[in-house]
Image (cartoon, rainbow, N blue to C red):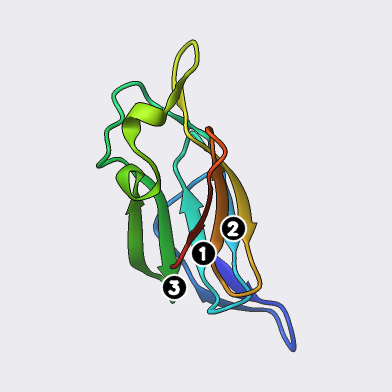
């Protein structure tokens, strides 16, 4: 749910999705819902796997696929998953910042 707290508390919209990792931008406002495993992807992940979904005004605006961020061959294997990135939140211009497991810094436009 996206809420305005001032001048009075008011619910603006609801995104019909859930993630344990989410970021809200001051620009928009935009909600970024990240892959449910956060920095981990299932072993069956492919370049077509959605890693971030951007929402605005209760509507899905854009899905970012793994192949837009990095080549699947660069994923780092853990015991049970693949590690892909560390999500850092939005910058002042409303871009989602992340760093891939091999150190590449990426800015995603909503």
Residue lying at 53% horizontally and 44% vertically, measured from the top left: 104
Question: x, y percentage for residue 7?
Answer: 74, 89
Of the residues under marks 3 and 1, which one precedes in the sequence?
A: 1
Q: Position of residue 69 (x, y in %)?
A: 40, 47
In the picture, measured across the screen, residue 103 lies left or right of residue 5, that is left
CB within 8 Å, label 3 to label 1: yes
Q: Earlier in the sequence, mark 1 or mark 2?
A: 2
The x, y position of residue 93, in whole percent, is 59, 75
Q: Is residue 6 above or below residue 75?
A: below
Alpha-carbon neighbours of circle 2 within 10 Å: few (<14), some, or many (≥20)?
some
Tally the numbered discs. Answer: 3
Q: CA distance from mark 3 to mark 2?
A: 12 Å
- Element under disc 3: strand
Residue annotated with mark 1:
31
Which numbered tag is attached to residue 22?
none
Furthest toward the top, the residue is 79
Graded by Cα atoms within 10 Å as few (under 14), some (14 to 19) or many (20 or more), the crowding at tag 1 reads: many
Q: Residue at x 54, y 66 (%)?
A: 95
Q: Residue at x 55, y 76 (%)?
A: 29
Q: Position of residue 14 (x, y in %)?
A: 46, 67
Quadrant of the image containing the C terminus: bottom left
Residue at the bottom extreme? 7
Q: Nearer the viewer, residue 16 or 30?
A: 30
Residue annotated with mark 2: 23
Pointer 3 residue: 56
Q: Earlier in the sequence, mark 3 or mark 2?
A: 2
Question: In the visual, does 87 lie left or right of 108?
Answer: right
Please name whichever residue, 102 or 8, is drawn nearer the observer in this view of the structure.
102
Q: CA distance from mark 1 to mark 2?
A: 6 Å
Kindly check if marks 1 and 2 are in contact, taking CB atoms under 8 A apart as contact: yes
């Amino acid at each position: 749910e996206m809420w305005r707290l001032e001048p009075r508390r008011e619910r603006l919209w609801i995104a019909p999705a859930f993630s344990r990792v989410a970021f809200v931008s001051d620009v928009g406002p935009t909600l970024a819902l990240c892959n449910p495993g956060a920095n981990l992807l299932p072993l069956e992940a492919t370049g077509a796997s959605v890693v971030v979904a951007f929402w605005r005004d209760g509507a899905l605006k854009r899905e970012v696929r793994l192949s837009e961020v990095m080549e699947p061959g660069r994923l780092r294997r853990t015991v049970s998953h693949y590690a892909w990135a560390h999500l850092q939140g939005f910058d002042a211009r409303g871009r989602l910042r992340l760093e891939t497991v091999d150190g590449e810094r990426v800015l995603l436009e909503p």
